[in-house]
Amino acid sequence: MSDLKFDTLTIHAGAQPDPTTKARATPIYQTTSFVFDNVDHAASLFNLQEFGNIYTRIGNPTCAVLEDRIAALEGGTAALAVGSGHAAQVIVFHTLLEPGDEFIASKQLYGGSINQFGHAFKKFGWEVKWVDGGDPASFKSAVSPKTKAIFTESIANPGGIVVDLAGISSVAKDAGIPLIVDNTLATPALCRPFEHGADIIVHSATKFLGGHGNSIGGLIVDGGSFDWSAGGKYPTLSEPCASYHGVKLHETFGPIAFAIACRTLGLRDLGPALSPFNAYLIATGMETLSLRMARHCENAQKLAEHLSGHDKVTWVSYAGLPKDPHHKLAQKISPGGAGAVFTFGVKGGYEAGVSLVNSVELFSHLANVGDTRSLIIHPASTTHRQLSEEQAAAAGAGPDVVRVSVGLEDPDDIIADLDAALSKI
Ligand SMILES: Cc1ncc(COP(=O)(O)O)c(C=O)c1O
């Protein structure tokens, strides 16, 4: 079977009936390790001369289904499943950067990524330069000889802001560096970043991919077309690898070299493996990705329209609204819809935001997005409280901001719950 359409791939990519038992659903291979045929077989696996299972920290057949499925849905050459979205980011940068290197990142990111890049990464000697994610020119002005990558979200958390991926990609191409896109909020059902010039995609599979709020996981997808050997900027990929008998990963593995490096060096040595059980839950969730994303977007659109006319609401930032400044770009970058995470401002600022999240009943007040259930948070008092006031405002998390992740319930119930809570402010 070839050239299967997207909705078919969400169900079938990566999975076949189990060759031994004929089980139709993907089995959970809950094992730490795999038996070698003989010493020669073991040697060829350890030498990267043959692909196969060794130890679940490096790879596992249930995780492989998830990897092949996301690679197919994003249009990449290969993928790697890891323990969380944050682990995916650590492994990507560990593969690309040396101590003293820099990368450029949009200021409009998930608050945890702002912390990871700005604080934790400093200990590795990796320096982030923050720029305005809405302006490709600000990425260009931040490029220096030490810059090794650009990072942005496609639809940015928490604001639901849509990013000009093609504009940023042309800055990356001019500088000879890869564009990494976090496609968590959009998922490939709405936006396919490789079609807009991305080189690497990362996901928090914890969110809409898994979709049911039950498993933490992360994914890295290799776009397969970046030339890692040009210019000598990426020695992990282009130079002889000391821990694999001098093999040059890019020369040996070509379009899947980045995914191989992330697995055989990043995941093997840093260790944030995904459990096979979580891989099973996430891959199962992905089977309904298109259906869920369409309904998420429909419900979000109805709620955003309702809130736009509400007298307790000062503004709504949702690219699905025709008056939104990101509306046109959203139709181009994210043709499947503007997503289901957006922010709005409540009259009365910080106190009103706190009152609202304390009063909801159907919405769950928690720090996650991309569940079947509708979720709400007041970022200034929770996810973004570690940031300075200036950083929080730049990330779209000022004192009056409330973020919702609109679930799959009946839209009338979603709207009625927020109306009731707003009336109590
Ligand atoms: C856009 C985005 N990227 C990355 C992450 C980190 O993912 P994880 O929590 O799976 O580590 C999150 C988590 O909320 C997120 O929303």
Image: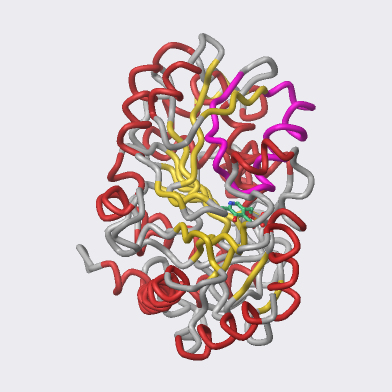
Looking at the rendered image, the quarter that the N terminus falls into is bottom left
- Residue 398 appears at what percent x and percent y? 65, 49
Residue at figure coordinates x 29%, y 48% from the top left: 329
- Residue 211 appears at what percent x and percent y? 53, 73
Q: Classify residue 1 as left or right of residue 298.
A: left
Q: Which residues are magenta?
A: 102-126
Q: Classify residue 110 as left or right of residue 182.
A: right
Nearer to us in this view, 174 or 8: 174
- Residue 220 appears at what percent x and percent y? 52, 48
Looking at the rendered image, the quarter that the C terminus falls into is bottom right
Q: Is residue 287 visible?
A: no
Q: Is residue 222 magenta?
A: no
Residue at figure coordinates x 70%, y 18% from the top left: 99
Eyeballing the image, is 379 above or below 98? Answer: below
Which image quadrant is residue 54 in?
bottom right
Residue at figure coordinates x 34%, y 23% from the top left: 173
Q: Is residue 117 magenta?
A: yes
Q: Is residue 255 visible?
A: yes
Nearer to us in this view, 177 or 405: 405
Eyeballing the image, is 6 above or below 299? Answer: above
